[in-house]
Amino acid sequence: MKGFRAWVYLRRVAKYILFYTLFILALLAIVYFTTKDPSITFKELISPQSRKDLILLIIAFSAVYPFIGFVKKDVHVNKFTEEDKEKVCHMAAEAGFFLVSDENGQMIFKARRFGMRLFRVFEDKITLDYHENPLVMDGMRRDVQRIARHMEYYFRQVEKE
């Protein structure tokens, strides 16, 4: 697998396991504390077999999602100028991201809203490497695809002019 980064993958798996475990426990706590029946204990909310199934589901999702949820995408351009950088920053801003850094031929964007960052388990970073043609975008699939489509459309329009 070209470009597979094991430590990044393992970090994402651990984050997803922790996040979804805490999320499900929080939902169970809400149900437990809002129930009208005082005889129900917290353990009774999930049967032993359901616990096993839930743990397997969390682990399976956490192991698979980093493979399908993150992508690198090439965006072909003739040349990448300062004006294009501003336009890309504007496209990212429209998608809910802001520029964190722009150095060494790499722009890094992060989500603007805390809620978005939280539910993406703080794996919301998008990098745009503009060292050469094609530009390479790396990040969460849906965000990279959305911004890359806007960039491709923009660069096609620039070529026509």
Image: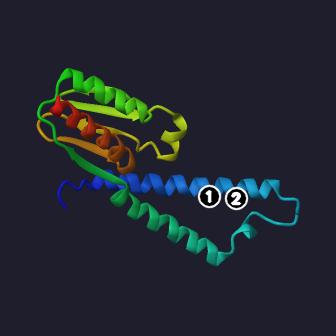
Rendering quarter of residue 106? top left
State the image coordinates of residue 60 (x, y, percent, origin top left).
45, 68
Query: Residue farthest to the bottom?
Result: 49
Task: Kindly identify the residue that appears in the image at 26 percent across and 34 percent down.
Answer: 154
Q: Assign the C terminus to one quadrant of the image.
A: top left
Can residue 91 be seen here?
yes
Q: Nearer the viewer, residue 117 or 83?
A: 83
| Above-or-below relation of 102 to 147 | above
| Above-or-below relation of 62 to 103 | below
Looking at the rendered structure, the secondary structure element under dot 1 is helix
Q: How is the image coloured?
A: rainbow
Looking at the rendered structure, the secondary structure element under dot 2 is helix
Q: What residue did someone put label 1 on?
A: 24
Identity, as a three-letter code, of the amino acid under mark 2: Leu
Number of the label disc, if any, that sits on residue 13: none
Task: Kindly identify the residue that appears in the image at 31 percent across and 50 percent down.
Answer: 8
Label 2 CA crowd tier, 10 Å (few <14, some 14–19, many 20+): some
Identity, as a three-letter code, of the amino acid under mark 1: Ile
Query: Residue farthest to the front?
Result: 161
State the image coordinates of residue 86 (x, y, percent, origin top left).
28, 23
State the image coordinates of residue 67 (x, y, percent, origin top left).
33, 60
Side of 110 relative to 134 (left or right): right
Side of 28 relative to 96 (left or right): right
Q: Assign the N terminus to one quadrant of the image.
A: bottom left
Q: Nearer the viewer, residue 119 or 54?
A: 119
Alpha-carbon distance for marks 2 and 1? Answer: 6 Å
Q: Are marks 2 and 1 in contact (CB under 8 Å)?
A: yes
Rendering quarter of residue 90? top left
Task: Kindly identify the residue that appears in the image at 20 percent across and 37 percent down.
Answer: 156
Number of the label disc, if any, that sits on residue 28: 2
Side of 94 relative to 131 (left or right): right
| Above-or-below relation of 22 to 112 | below
